[in-house]
Image: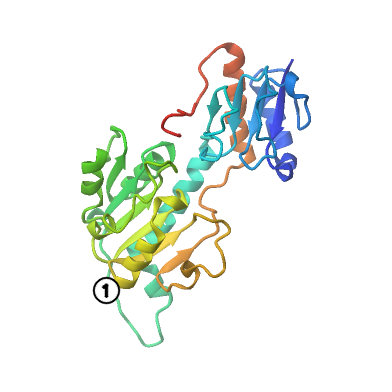
Amino acid sequence: MINVLFAAHPDRWESYEAPLKEAIADAGVTAFLATDIPPADVDYIVYAPNSPLQDFTPYTRAKAVLNLWAGVEKIVGNRTLKIPLTRMVDSGLSQGMCEWVTGHTLRHHLGMDAHINCAPGVWNNVAPKLAWDRKVTLLGLGELGTACAQMLAQIGFDVTGWSRTAKDIGGIRCLSGDDGLKEALTGAEIVVLLLPDTPATENTLNAETLPLLARGACIINPGRGPLIDDDALLAALDAGQIGHATLDVFRIEPLPEAHPYWHHPRVTVTPHVAAETRAKYSALTIAENIRRGEAGEPLLHVVDRKTGY
């Protein structure tokens, strides 16, 4: 029998206990799952970065840390972590992100706000563009970015994807590198950010890159708060270069009440709800990695410590 330590925020244990036990058993692994296993006896750590566990030194027998979050920026630099770290990729996370991104993209594409808030007697029945004629750029072509790009392309949007390293995704115009970023942003009418939070991606949208977008463009950020230079975005909103920003993630969360985003008429704040890790689905990814570890097979979604994702 192997020992699996659940080391996430204590209030998550109730929702994860049953799904994890069931998924691990269904994977054919005999395991003891608990929140209080002695460090020297632990084989795998199911983890979230807001866990009280921050020193991995005593876990001398552990084979891997299996992160419950898609983001690993709060753990990847932990110098006591010497064993493989995996990030969360699961069908529920991808589906949730696709639904959120598609909904907000369609909101801006169709001009829903103007129609919903139309004043009595105002009959502005100008039809929006078709999706075929709307340029949408996805920054980040990992699992989530690729899934969102493919869904938007399936609807009919003119989709360009950008990533730091070259990608080849059927039906998506893929660009990479610094020159590719400029090309991807130039003339974009809707930009969706799904990059990881690393030193190389901080302030990807800034005072130099925001003017590349089509005037009045919309920004949708369900990725990470530091991807955007907040001051530059606010200035671009005030100048009309950016028509609207829908933001789900921020440098400080919850977003402080006095932050200008709350009060700006061209900003929509959502409370980090774009893609939730759901125990029913994430448990399957955790169980598969435990099975793989015990079978001597490569783990899924192993984090590259150099790139930070």
Name the residue that disc number 1 marks: 126
Tell me the residue at 64%/43% (across/down).
50
Q: Is residue 113 rendered to the left or right of residue 56?
A: left
* Quadrant, the N terminus: top right
Task: From this view, report whether residue 248 is shown above or below residue 307.
Answer: below
Q: Is residue 238 rendered to the left or right of residue 51?
A: left
Residue 15 occupies which quadrant of the picture? top right
Tell me the residue at 66%/23% (across/down).
44
* Quadrant, the C terminus: top left
Q: Residue 249's x, y, as percent?
A: 49, 54
Q: Hey, what amino acid is under mark 1?
A: Val
Residue 58 occupies which quadrant of the picture? top right
The secondary element bearing badge 1 is classed as: loop
Looking at the picture, tell me which residue is in the foreground, 308 or 124.
308
Mark 1 neighbour class, 10 Å CA radius: few under 14, some 14 to 19, many 20 or more: few
Viewer can see residue 89? yes
Q: Residue furthest front?
A: 79
Residue 20 occupies which quadrant of the picture? top right
Q: Is residue 220 rendered to the left or right of residue 41?
A: left
Looking at the picture, tell me which residue is in the foreground, 71 or 171.
71
Q: Residue 42's x, y, as percent?
A: 71, 21
Q: Residue 236's x, y, as percent?
A: 31, 66
Q: Is residue 297 rendered to the left or right of residue 15?
A: left
Looking at the picture, tell me which residue is in the foreground, 169 or 204.
204
Task: From this view, report whether residue 12 is shown above or below residue 27.
Answer: below
Q: Residue 174's x, y, as percent?
A: 26, 39
Tell me the residue at 40%/80% (across/down).
118
Task: From this view, report whether residue 279 is shown above or below residue 81.
Answer: below
